[in-house]
Image: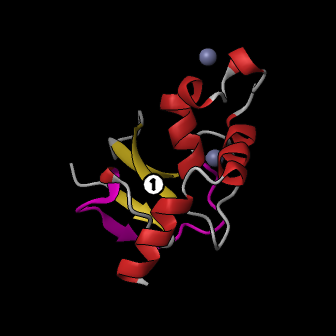
Amino acid sequence: MTALYFGDYWDVPALHGAIRHLTPFGVPCLYCEHPIEDDDRGFMRPVFTTSDRGAEFRPAHRGCDLAAVMGHHYGVCRCTGYEDLWACNVALEERGVFKLADRIGARRYN
Ligand SMILES: [Zn+2]
Ligand SMILES: [Zn+2]
């Protein structure tokens, strides 16, 4: 399935061929429940519901998304005292793990 992202492009394999989605301002993140803000970047992820719609797309901060899958690798998981994904997201952004991808993305698309 084609990935959907929101916010300015950042250059990672997951975004190659991905489609940009309108930033879902104010919608809570799938992982941390913090509402998405204007300058956030992330993915729209399909979530299966019991309603007759079947699946709906929910936003996920890119840091939350990364921490949910690769948190241990980046040292942001329960092992290192991180209990919630919002804290992981903030830590990953502060550490600049996406910095290079942002720079390349900005050069290519913005
Ligand atoms: Zn989040
Ligand atoms: Zn761990």
Q: Nearer the viewer, residue 12 or 60?
A: 12
- Percent x, y for residue 35? 69, 57
Residue at left offset 32%, top offset 41% = 54
Side of 29 relative to 94 (left or right): left
Side of 24 relative to 80 (left or right): left
Q: How many marks?
A: 1
Q: Is residue 71 magenta?
A: no
| First to last magenta residue range | 14-29
- Percent x, y for residue 79? 70, 15
Residue at left offset 42%, top offset 71% = 105
For the residue marked with disc 1, what is the amino acid?
A: Phe
**Residue underneath mark 1:** 43
- Above or below, 46 relative to 16: above
- Above or below, 27 relative to 86: below
- Above or below, 79 relative to 27: above
Residue at left offset 34%, top offset 47% = 53
Q: Is residue 18 magenta?
A: yes
Q: Nearer the viewer, residue 92 or 23?
A: 92
The image quarter containing residue 5 is bottom left
Question: Is the magenta region chiefly helix, strand or loop?
Answer: loop
Residue 61 seen in this snapshot: no
Residue at left offset 60%, top offset 39% = 31
Q: Nearer the viewer, residue 6 or 50?
A: 6
Q: Give the structural element (helix, strand or loop) at label 1.
A: strand
- Percent x, y for residue 25? 61, 69
- Percent x, y for residue 67? 57, 35
- Mark 1 neighbour density, 10 Å: few (under 14) some (14–19) many (20 or more): many
